[in-house]
């Protein structure tokens, strides 16, 4: 539990440093996630992204999985993105760390692992984009693929 608090503190400090930067874009994103492993549950993902330069950004996100009653399953990802496309169709490579936690009545467990994958953003307007990401998570059932589809929007 202390490790999760430490990582949360580092993430908050990291985000405060990012917000102190003067250049770059700040975006939000939300979507639906579904791990490609047997017995998986549908999840809802929300996150923010801060663009450091033309092609590098940080994108922390939080996912809540809809599991049976009395069980809570969540995931916190702290990813970096490297963009390779243009403004209308932009694709990126992503990687970072992930904390997956599950709790039931009186019992909880968490796993920390690494993520890596790729994604694409298709521009619908100046501030609205379609977003698709496929990542490999090392901590999901000994390693698994997690696709997410959603929208990205500028602030």
Image (tube, helix red, strand yellow):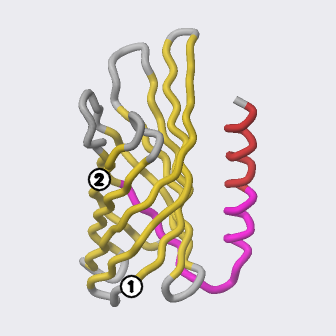
What label does residue 18 carry, if any? none
Q: Nearer the viewer, residue 36 or 91?
A: 36
What label does residue 147 carry, if any? 2
At x 57%, y 41%, the residue is: 112
Label 1 and label 2: CA atoms lie apart by: 20 Å
| Callout 1 crowding tier (Cα within 10 Å): few <14, some 14–19, many ≥20 | some
> What residue would you read off at disc 1?
84
| Callout 2 crowding tier (Cα within 10 Å): few <14, some 14–19, many ≥20 | some
Per the image, label 1 sits on a secondary structure element best described as loop
At x 41%, y 37%, the residue is: 142
Per the image, label 2 sits on a secondary structure element best described as strand
Instruction: Give x and y (percent) for residue 152.
Output: 37, 67
Instruction: Give x and y (percent) for residue 47.
Output: 48, 56
At x 49%, y 84%, the residue is: 55
* Picture quadrant of residue 70: top left
Q: How many marks?
A: 2
Nearer-N-terminus badge (1/2): 1
Instruction: Give x and y (percent) for residue 60.
Output: 54, 57
């Amino acid at each position: 539990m202390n490790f999760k608090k430490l990582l949360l503190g580092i993430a908050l400090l990291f985000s405060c440093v990012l917000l102190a930067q003067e250049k770059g874009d700040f975006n939000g994103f939300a979507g639906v996630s579904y791990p490609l492993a047997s017995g998986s549950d549908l999840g809802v993902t929300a996150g923010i992204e801060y663009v450091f330069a033309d092609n590098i950004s940080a994108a922390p996100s939080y996912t809540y999985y809809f599991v049976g009653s009395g069980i809570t399953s969540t995931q916190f990802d702290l990813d970096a993105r490297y963009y390779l496309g243009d403004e209308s169709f932009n694709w990126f490579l992503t990687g970072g760390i992930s904390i997956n936690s599950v709790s039931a009545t009186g019992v909880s467990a968490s796993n920390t692992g690494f993520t890596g994958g790729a994604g694409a953003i298709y521009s619908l307007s100046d501030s609205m984009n379609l977003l698709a990401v496929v990542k490999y998570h090392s901590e999901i059932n000994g390693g698994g693929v997690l696709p997410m589809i959603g929208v990205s929007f500028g602030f």
